[in-house]
Amino acid sequence: MNFVKMLVVSAAAIASLMPLSAIAQSFTIKDVAGREVSFDKPVERVILGEGRMLYAVAPIEKEDPFAKIVGWRNDLWTTDKDGFNAYVEKFPKGKDLPFLGNLTDGTLQTETVVKLHPDVLLLPIGNKTAADEVKLEDMLNGIGVKIVYIDFREHILANTEPSLKILGKLFGHEDRAEAVASFWKEQMARVTDRLKAANPPEPKVFMYRAAGLVECCGTFGPDNFGLMVDLAGGHNLGSDFLPGYTGSINAEQVVASNPEVIVVTGSNWSQTKDAKDFVNVGPNAAATLGDSRKALITLMENPAFTGSKAVAGGNVHAIWHQFYTSPYQFVAVQQLAKWFHPNLFADLDPDATFKEFHEKFLPVAYQPGYWVDAKAGQ
């Protein structure tokens, strides 16, 4: 009998001895894949199939976001070193948790998942195809480990609020999930309501995705940052070419589209293999704003951008890439709106919005630096 089969037998034996009090605490959630997932007791042990899920868990488990986490993927460390440091400095336990591999590139060690005895493995919806291919759900169900899919990336309007409420139920803080979702909607409406009333012209916007990590010209289609551009009153050029939320177009298409605004996404990718020439924006990046601006200006020397209206008019900016996989999209939408319609949103202060969110919901202090302009003083 192999290792997994032995654990299946053990789990079945334990289930037969389950007391009635535990059955009374059972609950069912519906995840963003439309699956109903039942639990026979409160969740105590959680694996984050993507480390950046901490952005969403933190406002739900404010006192200690790592209280129920027993393992996580290392992508928070590799793609947002400053964010990782902020959390593990306050909660040192996070630094000692085991890192797991990535399901989509075949490095996830399922035996490690089993040994950690989780109640639930949280996965981004983008992992479902890979999970289905290796029959991960069938294998983990047999030993009492449930998979739950959430999504803050592929369909941000449809799935952000449901994903928050799923986490609220899993972690036993449904009231907090409701409060975060309400704040999200209120802050989004500060932009969308004003745009609806004013109906200003929409500038053509090119989002340069993960500049320094991918060759020109990675961008976003009609969801994620592409949708955030639309919600902020711009026209996302990537939506003219891409059916999905992300992809690449060639430099000639960028030149022909002649964007009026260019926004680069950046982060502290210093721990990411082969990353270079990226723009460091994100928590604590305000301290090195000058270096970030220089990196942004250098990126605009690419022939895809040199003759554009955006470069000629000084409408070139960088914004924190990780807004694209967090429930903090309302901050990005507010900042994009200020760039696209500076007079209409002159009184809007996204820095103050994000600071307020930190003070109300997050366990770490706000550290500015989430965006930078190529032109100083904008």
Image: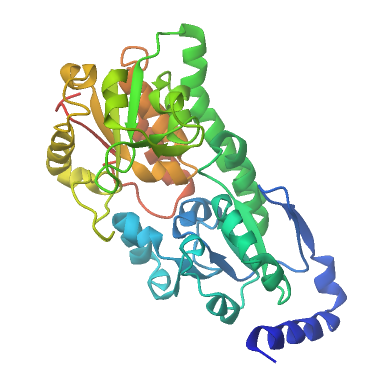
228 versus 288 height, above or below: above
Whole-percent x, y for residue 143 in the image: 71, 77
From the viewer's perspective, is 317 left or right of 13? Answer: left
Q: Residue at x 21, y 27 (%)?
A: 305
| Location of the N terminus (image quadrant) | bottom right
Q: Nearer the viewer, residue 223 or 283?
A: 223
Measuring from the top left, give residue 2's x and y in whole percent.
66, 89
Q: Is residue 292 above or below residue 171?
A: above
Residue 306 percent across, percent down from the top left: 16, 25
Give the residue drawn at x 17%, y 33%.
Answer: 302
Q: How is the image coloured?
A: rainbow
Locate the C terminus by quadrant: top left
Q: State left or right for residue 257 relative to residue 143.
A: left
In front: 364, or 265?
265
Q: In the visual, does 183 lie left or right of 312?
A: right
Q: Is residue 42 visible?
A: yes
Asked if one can make out residue 86 in the rendered structure from this viewpoint, the answer is: no
Instruction: Report the residue that reaches farthest toward the bottom.
Output: 1
Up-down relation of residue 230 to residue 172 (above or below) = above
Residue drawn 56% across the image and 80% down it = 111
